[in-house]
Amino acid sequence: MCGRFALFTSPEALARLFGVAEAPALEPRYNIAPTQNIAAVRIAPEGKAREWALLRWGLVPFWAADPRIGSRLINARSETAAEKPAFRHAFRLRRCLVPADGFYEWQRLARERRPYFIRLRERETFAIAGLWEEWRGPEGVAIASCTLLTTEANALMRPLHDRMPAILPPQDYDLWLDPDVQRPEALLPLLKPYPAEAMIAYPVRPLVNNPANDSPLCVKPLSQGGSF
């Protein structure tokens, strides 16, 4: 699964990396948690150009009676998202890219859960495949929300968890975002484990356990000072 991540690349660099004309108005974030607003790249609902959107992390299906369901839908299994009622509409029509500089996972030990930060070996910003949806309440309140897709863990991730975010390489961005591509058979092959040799994982301080802690110390390797 993916329950926390970080994004601290500059807005200007993000605009270049994701081919969006305008830079997003974002501050560096080191401990992004569910139900918070996160940056995503999508195709504008009434156009073909890419745009930035702020989406609540935790997808609220358009048919939901209660938007609180979103807190339980922060992740979607890529293998079944095209079939599940909560995600199938978005899988066909509302896909997005969620930029990240790394994500966290917790290793279960005998008496503790040890947090790790996982990033690309070359420190590149990457994109997690996402789905977004818009929900409207009876009083006209609108919530734009999203979920992150997960896939089987690669060899690097398996000691930590059996799932990992579905990371897309840049050459797949156009296909994933294309609103004219709606057949799951064309999209599911993109949602595969990212090569383990291109990633690195290292333990970090337990301060990341609290979403209120949002500083560069969250992503600093534990070996660079500090202890559990």
Image: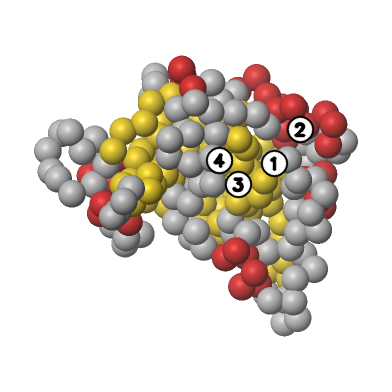
Q: Are marks 2 and 4 in contact (CB under 8 Å)?
A: no
Question: Image quadrant of residue 160?
Answer: top left
Is the residue 110 above or below the residue 144 in the image?
Answer: above
* Foreground tag (1 vs 4): 4
> Quick one: 119 or 6, which is closer to the camera?
119
Q: Are marks 2 and 1 in contact (CB under 8 Å)?
A: yes
SS class, disc 1: loop
SS class, disc 3: strand
Q: Pointer 3: what residue?
A: 148
* Foreground tag (2 vs 4): 4
Question: Image quadrant of residue 128?
Answer: top right
Q: Pointer 1: what residue?
A: 78
Rendering coords of residue 11 (x, y %): 44, 37
108 to the left or right of 80:
left
Q: Mark 4: which amino acid?
A: Arg
Rendering coords of residue 154 (x, y %): 53, 28
Q: Is residue 197 visible?
A: yes
* Cα distance between the residues tagged 3 and 4: 12 Å
Q: Are marks 3 and 4 in contact (CB under 8 Å)?
A: no
Q: Residues within 10 Å of mark 2 (few under 14, many from 20)?
A: some
Q: Mark 1: which amino acid?
A: Ser
Rendering coords of residue 116 (x, y %): 34, 40
Q: Residues within 10 Å of mark 4 (few under 14, many from 20)?
A: some
* Cα distance between the residues tagged 2 and 1: 7 Å
Tell which circle, 3 or 4, labels the residue nearer the N-terminal end: 3
Residue for point 75% across, 81% down = 138
Query: Farthest residue in the left direction?
Result: 225
Is the residue 52 above or below the residue 101 in the image?
Answer: below
Q: Pointer 4: what residue?
A: 163
Q: Mark 3: which amino acid?
A: Leu
71 to the left or right of 175:
left
> Quick one: 79 or 162, which is closer to the camera?
162
